[in-house]
Image (tube, helix red, strand yellow):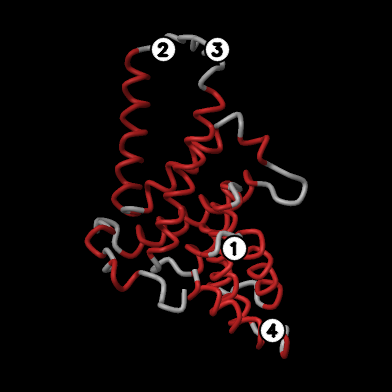
Amino acid sequence: KSRCVCCVCRGLVPLEMNTNDQNALVARSRCFLQLGEPGKALQDAETALVLDKNNIRAIYQKAEALYYLGQFEHSLMFFHRGLRLRPELASFRLGVQKTQEAIENTIGNNTKNQPQKKPVKVEKPKSAKRTQLSRQELEKRASRRLLGDLYIDKEYLENLLKHPDLRKADTNTECISDLAKDAINFLNNRQEFWRQQKPCTSLNAKKINAGNGMLPRWL
């Protein structure tokens, strides 16, 4: 912790001289997070984003701070935002995964004690049912082949939109549903792009080396 305290002190000096120093704000945000003060870390990250809304380091710090504050839906939103801006960075992918797991655990705990409703079975003609399942399976396979690992994110977001508790997470200022839809549209556009470029090539054959995909040392 002493090393982090020194880092915070080094960040305070340039901030006193220049409040528009984004690097100092991001560095101090990271140190506050390591010191267990995510609230202050969030303030510095947001200040840096006011100066530059596409500052990739500030986006990452805000996502991390929100995660440690337990605001998982908003954290997921900023991890996805960073992933859209810099899809080659593995740290944003890892952030998406851990926030998705946290949301699933939270929703699971809230719904565990609720009475389960029995689904109403609707009989369909066998031929129509077989055709529908076949078409859905073909679409899933094509999407999985084109998106590769990103298909997991798309599938999660689609399932998240169907969850009844998602509406409770929407606020007047930030609608998680709309942000999830934007992320799905982004993935659909990438899928269509790859379909036109290499319709039969799997994205998995072009996976980015994990070492090259991590955030630079300044994060």
Q: Residues within 10 Å of mark 1 (few under 14, many from 20)?
A: many
**Label 1–label 2 contact, CB within 8 A:** no
Q: Earlier in the sequence, mark 3 or mark 1?
A: 1
Q: Nearer the viewer, residue 175 or 68?
A: 68
State left or right for residue 42 relative to residue 193.
right
Q: Residues within 10 Å of mark 3 (few under 14, many from 20)?
A: few
As drawn, which residue projects farthest toward the front?
A: 2
Mark 4 = which residue?
15
Q: Nearer the viewer, mark 2 or mark 4?
A: 4
- Can you tell which mark lies on residue 115? 3
Q: Secondary structure at mark 3?
A: loop
Q: Secondary structure at mark 4?
A: helix
Q: Are marks 1 and 4 in contact (CB under 8 Å)?
A: no
Left or right: 94 as drawn, with respect to 60: left
Which amino acid type is shown beneath numbered disc 1?
Lys
Q: Which mark is residue 124?
A: 2
Q: Amino acid at mark 3?
A: Pro
115 up-or-down from 218: above or below: above
Q: Nearer the viewer, mark 2 or mark 3?
A: 3
Q: Which mark is residue 62?
A: 1
Q: CA distance from mark 2 to mark 4?
A: 67 Å
Mark closest to the chain's N terminus, 4 or 3: 4
Tell me the residue at 36%/69% (across/down). 214
Q: Compare residues 186 and 128 and report the one nearer the observer.
A: 186
Q: Earlier in the sequence, mark 1 or mark 4?
A: 4
Place of residue 6 in the rendered image (x, y in percent of width and height, measured from the top left): 54, 79
Which element carries disc 1, helix, strand or loop? helix
For the residues labelled 1 and 2, the Cα–Cα distance comes to 49 Å
Who comes first in sequence, dot 2 or dot 4? 4
Pointers 4 and 3 in contact (CB under 8 A)? no
